[in-house]
Structure formats: structure tokens, C-alpha cells
Amino acid sequence: MSTFDERSNAQETKFVLDAGKEFKAEAKRNKALGHWAAGLMGKSDAEADKYALEVIMADMEEAGDDDVFRKLRKDLTAANCDMSDKAIRDRMAMELKAAREEVYGV
């Protein structure tokens, strides 16, 4: 195997590992967001766990974070939780930062 092939394989492996870490960080973020929103909506611990899974699954609808945002926005509005779009997006960013720190060991 040539040096070029070895370098290419190493880059592909790194890409796959990084993508896996990012997926894990996003899932952790979504779980934390689910528990946060469930608390705002007054859900019990068991209901909060179930809701966190719903938020994780919502992220599978499309690429990006808009699917998660729409779920949180819709559910918080339905529960009469007065929360601005900016506050939700700020919380999403904060939870992603914390999740990345945990996953990447930063």
C-alpha cells in the first residue's frame, strides 16, 4: 500500500470517528433539551425521559437543527410556556457546547 493510500485511509477513518462523535454530542444535546423543556412544561421524571426521546427522534426528520427547534417551539407554546425563539436557540447552543465538551473531552 502506498503512502498516499495510507494517508487517505487515515483521513477517512478520522472523518468517520469525528462524525460519530458529533452524532453522539447532538444526541446528548437533544436529551438535555428534552429534559429542560419537560421541566418547563411540568412533566414528571418518567414523562421527561419519554419526552427527551421524542426530542432525540425529532432530530432525525431532516438535516440541521430546525426540526428540533420546531418541536420545542410547538410543544412549549402548547404548554403555555412563554419562551422566545432566541431563548430556545440560545439553550440549544449552550447544550450543544456542553455536550461537545463531554464527548470530545475538551
Image (spheres, rainbow, N blue to C red):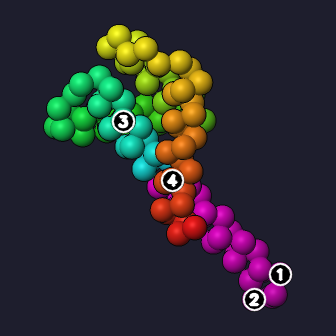
Q: Which mark is residue 36?
A: 3
Earlier-in-chain disc, 2 versus 3:
2
Res 53 seen here: yes
Earlier-in-chain disc, 2 versus 4:
2
Q: Residue at x 54, y 26 (%)?
A: 87
Earlier-in-chain disc, 4 versus 3:
3
Image quarter hosting the C terminus: bottom right
- The one of 85 and 23 positioned closer to us in this rendering: 85
- Give the SS element for disc 2: loop
Residue 43 lies in the magenta stretch: no
- Give the SS element for disc 1: helix
Picture quarter containing residue 12? bottom right
Q: Picture coordinates of residue 99 (x, y %)?
A: 49, 54
Q: Main secondary structure of the magenta part?
A: helix
Q: Which residues are magenta?
A: 1-25
Q: Residue at x 54, y 43 (%)?
A: 94
Tag 2 residue: 1
Q: Picture coordinates of residue 14 (x, y %)?
A: 65, 70
- Distance between mark 1 and mark 4 Cα atoms: 37 Å
Q: Work out whether 43 lies above or below 60.
A: above
- The amino acid type found where label 3 is placed reads Trp
Q: Nearer the viewer, mark 2 or mark 3?
A: 3
Q: Residue at x 57, y 40 (%)?
A: 93
- Distance between mark 2 and mark 4 Cα atoms: 41 Å
Earlier-in-chain disc, 1 versus 3:
1
Tag 4 residue: 98
Q: Picture coordinates of residue 51 (x, y %)?
A: 29, 32
Q: Picture coordinates of residue 74 (x, y %)?
A: 43, 15
- Distance between mark 4 and mark 3 Cα atoms: 14 Å
Around disc 1, counting alpha carbons within 10 Å, would you say few (fewer than 14), some (14 to 19), or many (20 or more)? few
Residue 20 lies in the magenta stretch: yes
- Distance between mark 2 and mark 3 Cα atoms: 51 Å
